[in-house]
Image: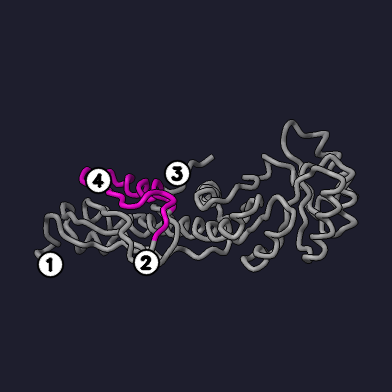
């Protein structure tokens, strides 16, 4: 399995490949600069270690980063985040890949933080989903944690989640849960329901968590009342979640809200990296 470092190295190669022809033409190999990383909007900083890792692949002996903000810190517009020193070529060749991951993860952490603030006076936890970008799941789920959320399952291997197609293929919720219960070691079993009748069936099984998927608020309230009256099973609500829905759901007796939009449609946080001063050296051919 690829590590996060392997993935970042591939991302850099995707951009750099045989070389940065513009930088190599304009900047001498020994030219050094200082660049400033700063915020252009409010949000949560996430992905510092990945940002540094991208630049580490250049093995630049002059490279260093001084961070003015910590992982998870709140950023305001125009905040200085870090000062970067090193070979100008290192900075210019690594900046896009490093910024891409930092902005993406900071966007996830920022969106998650907004949701957790809505739920701050409740016991409800906001969860991510498997709706992630290929190969970035581990990093994206860490960003959710940085924003104060919790992780749902990481893949198909660490929790039984019986969905609509499983139920159709198995013949019933009862049969699907029974098969998972027979196969499990210590994994949780969760079952997706879309109607009150399906909830009644799920209550008769060994499922640990009942997901109420794409139900109206009235249906959710009815199902929650029934589950709480007869069972200690956990309740998860899912289905096109947004801030307005969550402001209503925070008053319900549920345990989890799962939200694919924490990751799959998040807006990258607007950050910028600009060279502030020249440390030494000159551009090629004496051009300034």
Residue 230 in the image, given as x and y percentages of width and height: 87, 45
User: Is residue 168 in view?
Assistant: no
Is tag 1's residue or tag 2's residue first in the polypeptide sequence?
2
Residue corresponding to mark 3:
6
Q: What is the spatial separation of the Cα atoms under label 3 and label 1, in whole angstroms? A: 37 Å
Residue corresponding to mark 4:
60
User: Is residue 155 in view?
Assistant: yes
> Is 236 in the magenta?
no
Residue 17 in the image, given as x and y percentages of width and height: 36, 55
Residue 123 in the image, given as x and y percentages of width and height: 65, 50
Q: Observer-nearest residue: 144 or 154?
A: 144
Residue 285 in the image, given as x and y percentages of width and height: 11, 64
Q: Note whether 17 is above or below 40 in the view shown.
A: above
Which residue is found at the position 70% from the left and 41% from the top?
Answer: 159
For numbered disc 2, what is the local secondary structure?
A: loop
Q: Residue furthest left?
A: 286
Is tag 3's residue or tag 2's residue first in the polypeptide sequence?
3
Residue corresponding to mark 2:
77
Crowd tier of the residue under label 1, counting other residues whose Cα lies within 10 Å: few below 14, some 14–19, many 20 or above: few
For numbered disc 4, what is the local secondary structure?
A: loop
In magenta, the rendered stretch is 46-75
Q: What is the spatial separation of the Cα atoms under label 3 and label 4, in whole angstroms? A: 19 Å
């Amino acid at each position: 399995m690829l590590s996060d470092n392997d993935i970042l190295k591939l991302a850099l190669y995707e951009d750099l490949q045989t070389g940065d022809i513009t930088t190599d033409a304009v900047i001498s190999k020994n030219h050094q600069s200082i660049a400033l990383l700063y915020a252009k909007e409010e949000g949560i900083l996430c992905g510092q270690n990945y940002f540094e890792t991208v630049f580490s692949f250049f093995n630049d002996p002059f490279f260093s980063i001084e961070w003015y903000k910590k992982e998870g810190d709140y950023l305001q517009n125009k905040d200085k985040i870090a000062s970067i020193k090193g070979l100008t070529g290192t900075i210019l060749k690594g900046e896009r890949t490093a910024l891409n991951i930092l902005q993406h993860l900071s966007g996830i952490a920022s969106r998650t933080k907004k949701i957790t603030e809505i739920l701050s006076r409740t016991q409800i936890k906001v969860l991510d989903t498997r709706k992630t970008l290929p190969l970035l799941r581990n990093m994206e789920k860490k960003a959710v944690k940085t924003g104060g959320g919790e992780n749902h399952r990481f893949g198909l291997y660490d929790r039984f989640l019986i969905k609509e197609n499983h139920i159709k293929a198995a013949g019933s919720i009862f049969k699907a849960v029974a098969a998972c219960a027979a196969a499990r070691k210590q994994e949780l079993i969760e079952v997706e329901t879309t109607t009150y009748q399906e909830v009644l069936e799920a209550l008769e099984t060994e499922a640990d968590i009942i997901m109420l998927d794409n139900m109206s608020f009235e249906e959710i309230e009815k199902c929650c009342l029934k589950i709480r009256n007869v069972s200690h099973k956990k309740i998860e609500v899912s289905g096109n979640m947004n801030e307005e829905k969550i402001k209503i759901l925070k008053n319900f007796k549920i345990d989890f809200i799962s939200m694919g939009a924490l990751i799959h449609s998040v807006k990258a946080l607007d950050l910028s990296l600009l060279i502030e001063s020249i440390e030494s050296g000159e551009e090629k051919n004496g051009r300034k």
